[in-house]
Image (cartoon, helix red, strand yellow):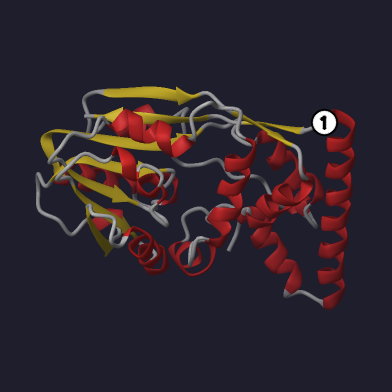
Amino acid sequence: MTEKDIFQNKNYLRDQQYKDSSNLDARANLHRLYSTSPLEWHRWVFAQLDLQPGMTVLECGCGPGWLWRNNLDQIPENCQITLSDFSDGMVAEAAAALADTGHDFRFQTVNIEAIPFADDSFDIVVANHMLYHVPNLAAGLAEVRRVLKENGRFYTATNGADHMRELKELALQFAPESTQFEWPQLTFRLENGRSLLSPPFAHIDLLPYEDSLEVTEVEPLMAYIQSMTLLQVIGRAEETASPERTEGTVAILNQLRAYLTQEIAKNGSFHITKNSGLFTAY
């Protein structure tokens, strides 16, 4: 596998990167701890949905169900909410976390390129930071449009080119043999999302999420970096090469930890740019 297809390789994403929520949680933890926004991400996204009593909702790429777990007190009555993901492990985690909540949650393993529901089934479809993982995006968007009701709305979050820029620079600087790799652009991002959504949807709005990170501890930052897809691919290649290269990977991670410790001590925090937003399409 190369850096060019790591974000869309279904086997890798399902069986390794998103087999369970451990990698995702390492990244989300950094945002939870050090975000400068007054409103947490999932609370902010939920507020944009304008969910009304009795609505039917489908989330594609639900992960461990954080959008709903963080907003249980905000869900209106009589909503039917189907949480789907192409990872069985993620669906199982979401189902376990949301059992016995008093809301009508349903769970199913689903590939967004072939959604197994009838036409005009949902008032709202949500895809939170996942469209860039879809190999056949046109097919996925056509399926979303098909299962939406006539006046339904599609909410999809993604990142821009500058998102977490400082960590990308660190990863490429400190990763073993990183000069062989080029950081791949997301196929669906803030800069091109409108044009990609426009074939199936007539109206598209973009709302930016104003935020950044001021990180004051090294270990949550190291956990984030080590969970990153590109570094995992590079590290796995290193580990299968030879014991000497494995030792080299450990040495470089130690150098990175020392560098970040020094930067935080000198500046009081390590600043990280964020560039995220939510498209609404209808």
Among the 4 quarters of the image, the one containing residue 125:
top left
Query: Where, quadrant-wise, is the N terminus in this rendering?
Result: bottom right
Task: Using a 10 Å C-alpha cutoff, classify the residue at mark 1 as few (fewer than 14 neighbours), some (14 to 19) or many (20 or more).
Answer: few
Residue at x 22% of width, y 56% of height? 115
**With 163 as the anchor, is 246 left or right in this view?**
right
- Image coordinates of residue 159 in percent, x first then y, are 50, 35
- Image coordinates of residue 218 in percent, x first then y, are 78, 47
Against 3, residue 205 (above or below) is above
- Image coordinates of residue 212 in percent, x first then y, are 62, 29
Residue at x 65% of width, y 60% of height? 232
Against 125, residue 193 (above or below) is above
**With 276 as the anchor, is 282 left or right in this view?**
left
Query: Where, quadrant-wise, is the C terminus in this rendering?
Result: top left
Against 73, residue 6 (above or below) is below
- Image coordinates of residue 156 in percent, x first then y, are 35, 37
What's the residue type where badge 1 is placed?
Gly
Among the 4 quarters of the image, the one containing residue 151:
top left
**With 13 as the anchor, is 182 left or right in this view?**
right
Front-lying residue, 262 or 150: 262
Residue at x 53% of width, y 31% of height? 160
Front-lying residue, 92 or 110: 92
Residue at x 11% of width, y 39% of height? 149
Residue receiving disc 1 = 268
What kind of element bears circle 1?
loop
